Image (tube, rainbow, N blue to C red):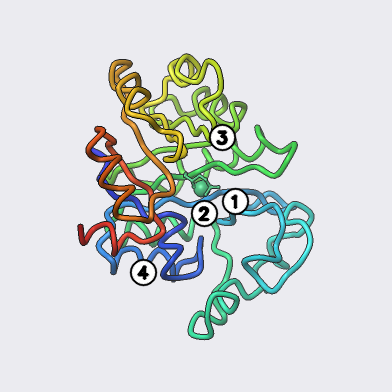
Amino acid sequence: MDFPKIVGHRGAAALAPENTLAGFRKAAEAGAQMVELDAKLSADGIVICHHDNELGRTSDGKGLVAVQDFAALRALDAGGWFGPSFKGERIPTLAEALALIAELGMGVNVEIKPCPGRERETAAATVKVVRDHWKGSFPFQFSSFKLAALEVALEQAPDLPRGYLTDDFAEGWLETAQRLQAVSVNGNFRRYTKQRIDAVHAAGMKALAYTVNEPADAARLLADGMDILVTDCPDRLLAL
Ligand code: G3P
Ligand code: MG
């Protein structure tokens, strides 16, 4: 199934706490047909939805995610920091997130976001959860900035599409995306020029830009041929 033009970033990060079930619901309410989330491992190997290596910004915990067992992570409040109405929101497992996202009728971009040194382990565990819990009737892709994670995804789930994430379009970016047999190049919108979009298309891939929140940026990118925009504000971009 084709990817929609608008993808909610970490759910709908401007509207609800990122990487939470409330956030995925909010994205669906806003009309998003697909969401992006960040997958990483607890100390005891459970795949959870969380962006940072540390806990402090998006929960009432502190310290490193990588040293906490899932039971401790689950006890944290991952919503109150965003607003009082989200107090009590929990860090979801990837399995829970995938079940809800499918129930809401959306697709998903599972960004493999390993804590340092856990690249292959995180990718393998994430692939397994997706295999066990994603039934495949909606658009799907893995993405990662970490080559080791995408290599594991290619080895273990060659049939599931991959997006090659790049912040800086460093030397050899297009060849790397091709080597990983990516279906898309997922780049920082500030550095995604028309020339790069054209190169991606010429190589038979889609161009995806993150994180696009301003209508003027969205208009420029779409005029240049951008296929997919990842946004904190799906409501705002869908209204265009
Ligand atoms: O997948 C797009 C985007 O989420 C990549 O950056 O840091 O928000 O995970 P980040
Ligand atoms: Mg992400």
Callout 1 amino acid: Val
- Per the image, the residue denoted by label 3 is 145
- The amino acid beneath tag 4 is Lys
Identify the secondary structure beneath mark 3. Answer: loop
Which element is circle 2 on? Answer: helix
Name the residue that disc number 2 marks: 94
- Tell me if label 2 and label 1 are in contact, CB under 8 Å: yes
Q: Position of residue 83 (x, y in %)?
A: 52, 80
Q: Residue at x 45, y 18 (%)?
A: 174
- Of the residues under marks 2 and 4, which one precedes in the sequence? 4
Q: In front: mark 3 or mark 1?
A: 3
Vertically, is 52 above or below 175?
below
Residue 170's place in the image compared with 118, above or below, is above
Q: Amino acid at mark 3?
A: Phe
Asked whether disc 4 touches disc 1, contact meaning CB atoms under 8 Å apart, the reply is: no
Q: Categorize mark 2 by other alpha carbons within 10 Å: few (<14), some (14-19), many (20+).
A: many
